[in-house]
Structure formats: C-alpha cells, structure tokens
Amino acid sequence: MATSLRIVVTGGSGKIGTRLLEVLIARGHQPIGLDRDNPTPPVAPFVQADLRERAMLEPILEQADAICHLGEYPQLQPDMRADQLFAHNVTVGSRVLQTAADLKLKRIVYVSTCQVYGLWGDHYAKINTPPKLPMDETAARRPQDAYALGKVAVEDYACMLAEQNPGLSIAAIRLPWVMDDREVANARAKLPEILQMRDGMNTYLHLDDAAEVLAMAIEGDGKGFKAYHAVADDIISARPTREILKDRFGEEARLPPDFPDFGSPVTTEKARQHFGWTPRFSIHR
C-alpha cells in the first residue's frame, strides 16, 4: 500500500472521476473532488469551483500532495463552437497544471486521450501510412478535431512545466472509450455484429481498469513528463485485429506472427513496467 496522499481530483463529479474517488479511498488515500457540478450523492469531500479561476484553485491545492486532472469538456456542449471547446479546455488544463506546479505538488496526472493520434473519434484521419504496430506512445500525434488538439496542447504545456521545474513528476494517461457496466453489457450483446467502429482501432477500457491505472499513476514517482497508454488487452470486434488493420492500412499494417486474434493494436507495456498495472477486464470472456 502506498503512503496515504491528499489527492485532488478535478472533474470529480463525472463518470471516471467518481469511480476514481472511490478507488482512492479504498487504497487508503484522502481524496477531494473538484468540479463545476456537485455530485449527488458525493463519494468523497467535494468543492464546487470554476477551474479557470486560480483564486479558487490555490486554497485547495495548497493542502494537496497530488492532483489528477479530469475536469475538461469531453465533447462539444450544446450551443458551443469548436473554438470555444478548445479555448475552454486549454485554459482549464494550463491553469490547473500551472497552479499545481507553482505550489510544488509531488505528482500531477493529466487524463488525455488516444484521439491525439488522429485514429480515434468521429473525425479520424484517413492516414495511409500505419503507425508502428503494436502502437506505442512514440507514434506521431495528428489531432483531427478541436477536442484532440486541446489535449495535445495541454500535454505540451505539461511537458514544458516538467522541463522548467526539475523534479516535477507529470504523467499523461491516454485513454480510449471508457465503458461502464451498462455500456459493456450493450457492447457484449452486439459483439457478433460489430465489425469496424468509427475510431478505426476498436479499442476500449473498462471503467474499473481506468480508475485503477489513474490511481496507480498518482502513486507513481519519477521526474519529468511521460505519456502512457491505458487500453484493454482486446478489442470490441467480431473480426480479428489483423483483418481490421489490413482494411484500414493495407498490407503495410504488419503485426507479429503470434499476435492474438483480438489483441489490442495499442501496447500498454510502458504502464505495466512503470506502475505494475494490467487491465483485468476482457469483453471476449
């Protein structure tokens, strides 16, 4: 068990944030949720705050050892333009990370997305040249919409902060579609019909596995900025991974000969090595 930490979770009223608060409590930590909306009922101490306002952030972060930043819009909101989504998320992300760095928190975890590569999401790129497979965190980022571009911008801001503050530890966790139990049940029921999803990679992660990897990342240490994938070991598809990638990229998409039929084309080896994390959920069993 890691030393008990005082951890702020922004976006603590959301699906992932709520589950993360529960996991952190179970692991012996002292979390506090922070968001623009109050959860009902709260699972941990909670503060309602505008994450764009440093005056609201500072008194809370001054009492913390670490922070996990989830508090950004996950998609366009009603009556919101793409430029407004981008401006909001980048403002919130940079403000939260800068405040945490200035206050010298021990650990910062930023929740990013696999959409930074341009191969996930509704607007994924028609990229003819495949990434190195299985795909690791060194793959080129090619964001295709305002949401993904905002994530790239905040990742880069985090990297700058780490370079400017020797000893600062920042981890960016790139997630695919995170599914709760209801979404998993629906996907399992439809699995025989699922051939190709919109994201082109058919990846996912169960909510419990997402909360666990974030908790383990918060407990981690090290110096500088590092990015990590966190995806399930298998894909949501009735077609083998090799067939999906061949249709997507052509013969150039080559996997090792012994690659599992429904194995994820995205490697999580870095998270396994650094955190000891292994996804436990499989949609195929």
Image (tube, rainbow, N blue to C red):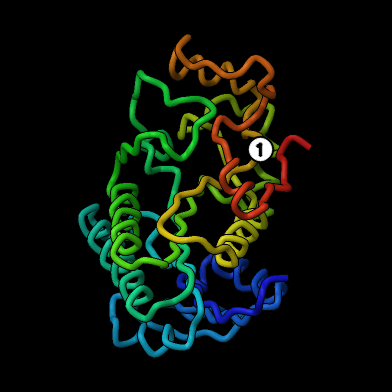
206 vs 256: above or below: below
Residue picked out by circle 1: 233
Q: Where residue 94 appears, x then y in whole percent?
A: 29, 66
The answer, for residue 90, to whether it is visible in the render is yes
Q: Where residue 115 appears, x then y in whole percent?
A: 40, 43
Question: From the viewer's perspective, is 207 left or right of 82?
Answer: right
Q: Where residue 164 appears, x then y in whole percent?
A: 28, 64
Question: From the viewer's perspective, is 269 left or right of 97?
Answer: right
Hey, which residue is sitting farthest right in the picture?
285
Q: Residue at x 40, y 34 (%)?
A: 139
Q: Nearer the viewer, residue 259 or 16?
A: 259
Q: How many marks?
A: 1
Q: Where residue 261 appears, x then y in whole percent?
A: 68, 22
Q: Residue at x 27, y 49 (%)?
A: 146
205 vs 132: above or below: below
Q: Nearer the viewer, residue 4 or 232?
A: 4
